[in-house]
Amino acid sequence: MLDDIDRRILRQYQAAPDEGHAALAARCGVTATTLARRLDRLRETGILKATRGVIDWAVLGYTVEVSLRVTLDKSMPQAFDEFLAAAREVPEVLEIQTFLGQVDVRLSVIARDLSHYQALYRDRLLALPHMTDVEALMHVARLKSDETLPL
Amino acid sequence: MIDLDDTDRAMIRALAEDATLSAGALGRRFGLSQPAAWRRVRRFREAGVFRGHRLECDNAALGFGVTVFLGVKLATRGRTGLGDFERAVQAIPEVQTVEHVLGMYDYRLRVVARDIADFERVLRRRIMTLPGVGSLDANVLLSEERRPGPLGARGARVQDATS
């Protein structure tokens, strides 16, 4: 089980995941050895799954980001599996989420510009199987994106 | 915009999976010397290829069993209203991401909660009391998959075909 020190480490690590471990140990008020041992244990138990690099796709030339909210034909038993398998084949799809609610699936899609998006939408996305309705939200700005947990 | 070769793309993909990989480890994986790998990593940093690092935790094991995406439409428009809403919403600890979007909603929020009852508390006490909130649309997350994006050789081919 997690104790207060584990929680403190996770809280501080989340808040500044780019910092070195020496600075992290200092902010947590533990020694470097304790920090390393605790982090190893958090990784072993699967609580800390990974430290990901967050790509700035605009720097790689992808300036358009669209959220596609998709409703599927639930009368088809394989609708979800087949839709998800086909969506995975589109390289520009960055995130696939399934929901309980009005929307069944959401795809986060990037494109180099609007004409690239238009081509992608017509040729690849509208061709995905079992969609009954699709709505697009154009991404304007990301105001908060740290995805930290209120530990 | 930065020009990338196949090795750069493979390295970016590897660092997106595990940002803690050292230049030595990257070099061994992609057949480069440690200094050569380091030069590429430094070039990524100078170009700003990565916005930063993000910890991926087992949310459920940490007591956060519910993630909800909220579409928020503001009731009153105008610059002051937008600024007030944006400041207040970012200060809510349970709100993990805030995106300004165009379409049927103005903002898209990712909210974590311990369970549905806890989510209801966050919704009623924190979100519905935000300045300018009009209508809300909630969708409870069932599963989530993050894809590597157009970084592979296959992705490059698709890009070429559509350009």
Image: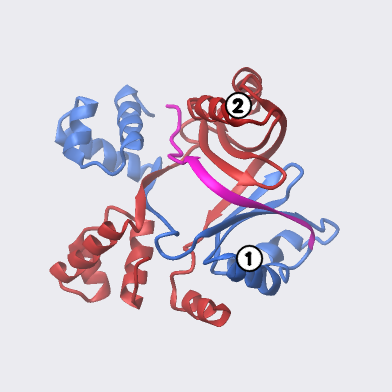
Tell me which amino acid carries mark 1: Ala
Q: Is A123 placed left or right of A96 in the picture?
A: right
| Percent coordinates x, y for residue B16 in the rendering | 38, 58
Q: Is A62 placed left or right of B30 in the picture?
A: right
Task: Using the image, determine if residue B90 lies above or below residue A135.
Answer: above
Tag 1 subunit: A
Task: Using the image, determine if residue A98 lies above or below residue B49.
Answer: above
Q: Colour of chain B?
A: red
| Percent coordinates x, y for residue A112 in the rendering | 52, 67
Tag 2 subunit: B
Q: Is residue A144 magenta?
A: yes
Front residue of A63/A30: it is A63
Extent of the magenta region: A131-151
User: Pointer 2: what residue?
Assistant: B81
Q: Which chain is blue?
A: A
Q: Is A138 placed left or right of B157 in the picture?
A: right
